[in-house]
Amino acid sequence: MSDNVPLSQLAMARPGGGADYLDGLNPEQKQAVETLEGPLLVLAGAGTGKTRVLTTRLAHIIRTGRAKPWQTLCVTFTNKAAREMRDRAQNLIGPDGEGLRWLGTFHSISAQILRRHAELAGLKPTFTIIDTDDQIRLCKQIIEAENIDPKRWTPRYLAGLIDGWKNRALLPDKVPSDEAYQFADGKGIRLYDIYQRRLSILNACDFGDLLLLTIRLFQDNRDVLAEYHDRFRYILVDEYQDTNIAQYLWLRLLARGTGNICCVGDDDQSIYGWRGAEVTNILKFEQDFEGADVIRLERNYRSTGHILACASQLITENKGRLGKTLWTEGDEGEPVKLRGLWDGEAEARLIGDDIESWRSSGRRYEDCAVLVRASWQMRAFEERFIMLGIPYRVIGGPRFFERAEIRDAMAYFRLIRSEDDDLAFERVVNQPKRGVGASSLQKLQQIARGDGRSLHTITRMVLQTDEIKGPAKRGLTSFMNHLDMWRDKHHGGMSHTELAEQILDESGYTDMLRADRSPQAATRLENLKELINAMGEFDSLAGFLEHVQLVMDTSRDGGSEDEVQILTLHAAKGLEWPMVFLPGWEEEVFPSKRSIDENGNKGLEEERRLAYVGITRARERCYISFVANRQIYGRWQSVIPSRFVDELPHKHVEAISETGYGQRQGFGESFGGGSSSFEDLGEKSTYSSPGWKRMRETTRKRSAPPVIDGKAELIASTDPGRAGFKLGQRVFHIKFGYGKVEQIEGAKLTVEFEKAGTKKVIATFVEAA
DNA sequence: TATTACGTATTTTTT
DNA sequence: ATACGTAATA
C-alpha cells in the first residue's frame, strides 16, 4: 500500500507517531481512505459519513507524504462544499493544508487553468466570465439580429439549448444533425455558432465554456496536459453522481496521468438531471475507469431505523441504480407519520401546531425544517407561521449579486478591466441616463457587428465622426472620458475600493439612486456600500471580479437565530434536521407533472430520488403529508396521494387521517370557502431584504403591528408587488402582494381585488425593507 | 420618459 | 391567479 514511500518519510509525516485522524472510522470508511492507487468509487449512502471520508483521505495522502497539498486535485460542485472540504481538511492536516491550491469547483479550477494558458485557449488572460443573465441577453441580441421572433423563440430557450449542448461537451460543429434544427426552423446550430463567435470577440466565457475550453486545451496541447498529469498525483471528486458529460471528459483527461482518481457519490441522490447531470456516469464508473474498485458505505449515522427503512424501501422502486443497503445501529425511533388532510391550509395549520408543541417540549425551532417540492408551496407555510408567530427562514431565493444595482456596479468594474466587454458596456452606457437611447445603441451595435469589433472600440471611432449627434454624442463622450479616466487611475495604482467608490459617484449612479425617493432605492444604496465593503476583502480588482463571477460566497455565515427553515428539497441536499416535514405528496405536485411529462420514467425516478433525499434528511422524526384539495395557479383542484405514499413500507409508517379522507370515496367533494388569509390577523410582519452577509436568505420576521393614525398615504401601482401605503418614512406592502390599495381609514386598509371584483378590508402588512 | 396594458410562463439551482 | 417583461401609449 505504501511501498513507494520511504519509511523514514512515513514516520516523519506523522507527528505523534500515529495516524490519529483515522481513529473512529468504521472498516469501510477506513478502507475508502486507505485505498489510494488506481480508480476508486466510494458509494456513500445518505448519512454514512461521506465528507468525513473525503477529508480524511485527503489528509491521509498529505500526512503520509504521498503528495504535497498542491499535488492533489479536489473537485466539488459548489463553493460551499469546497469551503467545507478545505476547512475540514486543514483541520486534519495542520499548517501544511494551506497549500491546497487545486481544491475547488470544476469551474473555478478550470478558470485557474485557463487563465494560465489563455492564449492557447484563444482568449486574453483578462477574459470575463459571463453569467446566466448576460448569456440570455446575448442570445436575445442574436435572435433579434437574425430577425427571429423572440416571442416564439425565446432567448431563454436558446440559452438553455446551448447550455444543454455544452453540458454534453458539444461545440457547434459536433452537435448531431437531428438536434441542430431544434430552434427557429433549423437555425439553432447557426445561432450557437454566432453565439460562440460573439463570446470570442467579447473575450468572454460562459460557465460551460470554462469546462469545454479546458477540455479542448488539453486535447490540443498534449504538453500542457502532461504538465498537469505530472502535477496531480491524486484526484478526488465529490458528488460524482452530479457530473455532466463535459465534467466526465474533463476528469478522464486528467485521470489519465496517475490513474489515482477517487470519486465519491450516491446514485440515489442524483437530483440534478435537469441541469445536465448524468446518473449514468456513476453507474458506468467501473467500465469507464478500468480496474476500478468500488467501496460501499452503508452504515448510517444519521437517522432512526424507521426513517431509514422508509427511505430504503422507497428507493428500491428505482430500476437504474447500483444498489446499497443502509443500516443503523441506532434506535428504531418513532414510525414515520403519514397524514392526509383536506387542503393546503389544514396542512399548514397542522404542521404549525406540531412545531409549536415541539417547541413547548423544550426543543428548538432551528431543529425543524419544511421541505417542499416547488417554491410556490412555501407561501402557505409562511402565512401560517406569521400568524402563529413562529420564526422562520426561507432558504433560497434571489441572491445578492444578482440584484440589478450590484450587476450594474459590476458592469462598470468589468469595463475597467476588460474594455471589450460589450455586455457590460450595454448594461451601463445609459445607466444612469445619459441620453444614449435605444436608437443610438442600436446604431453602434450595427456597426460593431459589421466590423466584428467591440462597442468600446466602435464608439471611440464613431465619436470622431458625425454619425451620432446631440445629447447621445455628449452622453457617449462623457461616458468614454470617464472610463478612460478610471482606467488610468486603476493602472496608476489607486486602490480598488477607492476607485469603486469614485466610479459609482462620478458616473452619477449614486446620485441617481439618491434622487429616487422610492423605498427600494435606499436598500440599493446600502447594497452598494456592502459591495464595496466586500471588495475590501480582496487585494485587487481582478481577484474580486473573479470571485464574484465564479466563486462568490453565496452561503450564510452560520444561522445563529432560532428559526424553522423552509426550503426546497433540492436546497436540502447535504443538510439534516431532527424533525423534518415533507408536505405536498400529491400526484402531479410531487412527483412533479412536468418532470414526468418531459422525461417520462427517467423523470419519475429522479423525483423518487428527491423523495429519498427528503426522508433521509430527518434524524428523529419525519412527517409526510398530502391533501385532497389544493389550489394550484389560483384554481382549486382535487388531487390524489402521490404514488410514493403507497411505496412506503406499512411496518414503518403510522398513517393518520385528519379529515376522514381515506374512508371516503373519491376526493371530488368540494371544499367550501377558499381562503381569507388577510382578515383579522391583527398582526404585522416585517420584511427584511437579504444583504451581503446573508445572500441567499429571505427573512421575514414577526414584530409589533403598525400603528396607523390616518396619516397614511397611498402608493398606487399596477404592479401588485409595489402597491401599498406609506406611513411617514415607513412603507408597507400588502402581505404577499395582492390587489390594489383603495382606501386607508384608521387601521383599516381597503383593497380592491380587480379580477375578482371584490373589496376586502385587510390588516396584515409587510413592511418594505 | 413614465405609466399602463398585454402576453406568457409557472420545478428544481450552480457555476 | 400572479409576476414579470415588453410593447404601446400619453
Image: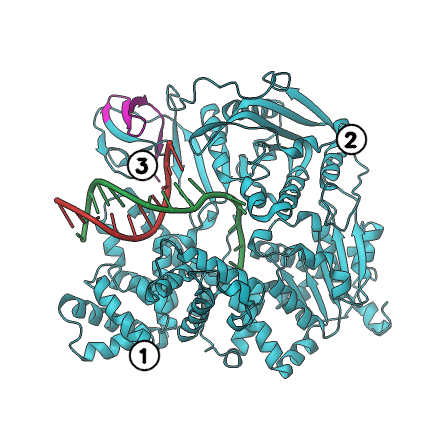
Chain colours: A cyan, B green, C red
Residue A485 visible within the image: no
Measuring from the top left, give residue A715's x and y in whole percent.
24, 35
Which secondary structure, mark 2? Answer: loop
Q: Mark 2 highlights which residue?
A: A332
Highlighted range, magenta: A743-769
Residue drawn at the location 60% of the way across and 38% of the way down: A591
Residue drawn at the location 44% of the way across and 29% of the way down: A635
Q: Mark 1 highlights which residue?
A: A451
| Quadrant into which the N terminus of chain A falls | bottom right
As displayed, is residue B11 above or below residue A205? Answer: above
Same subunit, tags 1 and 3? yes
Letter of the chain that mark 2 sits on in the rendering: A
Which callout, 1 or 3, points to the residue nearer the camera?
1
Q: Mark 3 highlights which residue?
A: A720
As displayed, is residue A342 above or below residue A368? Answer: above
Same subunit, tags 2 and 1? yes
Letter of the chain that mark 3 sits on in the rendering: A
- How many angstroms separate mark 2 from mark 3 (CA)? 50 Å
The secondary structure that dominates the magenta segment is strand
Q: Earlier in the sequence, mark 2 or mark 1?
A: 2
Q: Give amino acid for label 3.
A: Pro
The quadrant where residue A760 appears: top left
Q: Give the class, few, some or many, for how many residues have Cα within 10 Å of label 3's Cα (few <14, many ≥20).
A: some
Same subunit, tags 2 and 3? yes
Measuring from the top left, give residue A255's x and y in whole percent.
71, 70
